[in-house]
């Protein structure tokens, strides 16, 4: 079987077009969405992600407020900045890029962002709402994965899904989203004894553990759908290369659908962040989006 390659770049571009339309609609009512991004330190990968978030926001007409802070900023100073952004009416979304340096308590920082300006869905209230199956801000990467799964137009009900990795950013919220889709969900992690066997029984595999080529071809059930969240930089034949958490070149011959790296989940994450920003903006301004712009995605 030759897997359908889920083109994240293309789906993300469609989603961004819908975001741009929603921005135009809001602008007509004198509402101008704004996104503040905060980067602490100089981690090269994080710097690239945040720069892309700001650039794409601007391209869609979302005002971008970019804060590149020194690694040694104190927790108190960071809280002060977030408090100011919470009170700034030009800002609808606040994103603090993770991970933060060790001297800063991530939980405190994430809970300082007002829940109605949280565009990552990482605030306790938003995470709780997702867990309780209430209206919630959905974390961008799992939302991007779900949109790609839905683009296949196959019923997900009753499918067995395995999520490899239990992070707050991807694994845990992804498990909630797939439960909501009526999948039977297993989350495996570094202490799980029989990962291979569990993966072999799964119709959907979401790999989000951050180890290059970890998931092997022999683990995959023929016809499974494989979503690769990993972005790993490796050296191959002396050249730098970006690879995912699964053996893409081999698995594509037995899966029914698979996301590539790059060009899969990555672009979807940013598009979902921009959608979340516009959704927060419209909801904070009590504006119903025109004929729900995002009906094909949410
Ligand atoms: N670091 C890795 N992924 C994410 C994300 O989706 N949001 C934030 N804020 N930080 C991240």
Image: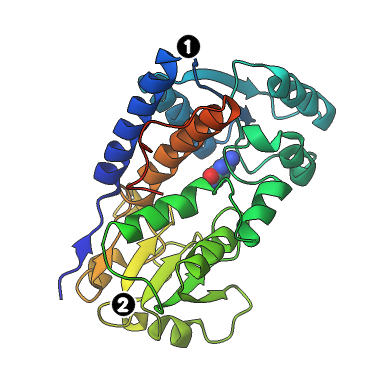
Q: Quadrant of the N terminus?
A: bottom left
Quarter occupied by residue 2: bottom left
Across the whole image, how many numbered discs are drawn on residues?
A: 2
Residue sitting nearer the eye, 134 or 235: 134
**On the picture, is 224 further left or further right than 124?**
left
Identity of the residue drawn at 26% across and 56% down: 6
Residue at the spot of label 1: 30
- Image spot of residue 7 (x, y percent): 25, 51
- Above or below for 59 versus 169: above
Query: What kind of element bears circle 1?
Result: loop
Ligand 1 within 8 Å, label 1 CB: no
Identity of the residue drawn at 65% across and 46% down: 122
Decide if residue 182 is in sight here: yes
Quarter occupied by residue 93: top right
- Above or below for 210 versus 40: below
Lower position in the chain sequence, tag 2 or tag 1:
1
Q: Are marks 2 and 1 in contact (CB under 8 Å)?
A: no
**On the picture, is 283 further left or further right than 297?**
right
Residue sitting nearer the eye, 272 or 192: 272
Identity of the residue drawn at 43% across and 32% down: 289
Callout 1 crowding tier (Cα within 10 Å): few <14, some 14–19, many ≥20: few
Identity of the residue drawn at 60% across and 37% down: 97
Quarter of the picture for ligand 1?
Answer: top right
Residue 217 is marked as 2
Decide if residue 73 is in sight here: no
Residue sitting nearer the eye, 67 or 285: 285
């Amino acid at each position: 079987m030759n897997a359908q390659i889920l083109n994240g770049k293309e789906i993300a571009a469609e989603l961004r077009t819908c975001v741009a339309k929603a921005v135009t609609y809001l602008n007509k009512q004198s509402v101008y969405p704004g996104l503040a991004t905060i980067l602490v330190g100089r981690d090269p990968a994080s710097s690239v992600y945040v720069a892309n978030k700001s650039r794409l926001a601007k391209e869609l007409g979302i005002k971008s407020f970019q804060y590149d802070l020194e690694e040694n900023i104190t927790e108190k100073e960071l809280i002060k900045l977030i408090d100011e952004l919470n009170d700034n009416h030009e800002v609808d979304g606040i994103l603090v890029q993770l991970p933060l340096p060790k001297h800063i308590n991530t939980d405190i920082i994430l809970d300082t962002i007002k829940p109605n300006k949280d565009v990552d869905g990482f605030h306790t209230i938003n995470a709780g709402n997702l867990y309780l199956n209430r209206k919630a801000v959905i974390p961008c990467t799992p939302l991007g994965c779900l949109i790609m799964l839905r683009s296949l137009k196959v019923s997900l009900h009753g499918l067995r899904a395995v999520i490899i990795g239990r992070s707050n950013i991807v694994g845990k919220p992804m498990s909630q989203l797939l439960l909501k889709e009526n999948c039977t969900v297993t989350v495996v992690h570094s202490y799980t004894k029989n990962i291979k066997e569990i993966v072999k029984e799964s119709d959907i595999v979401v790999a989000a553990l951050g180890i290059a080529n970890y998931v092997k071809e022999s683990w995959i059930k023929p016809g499974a759908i494989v979503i690769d969240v990993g972005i790993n930089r490796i050296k191959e034949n002396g050249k730098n290369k970006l690879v995912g958490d699964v053996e893409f070149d081999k698995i594509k011959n037995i899966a029914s659908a698979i996301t590539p790296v790059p060009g899969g989940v990555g672009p979807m994450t940013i598009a979902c962040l921009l959608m979340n920003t516009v959704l927060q903006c419209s909801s904070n301004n009590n504006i119903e989006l025109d004929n729900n712009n995002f009906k094909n995605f949410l």
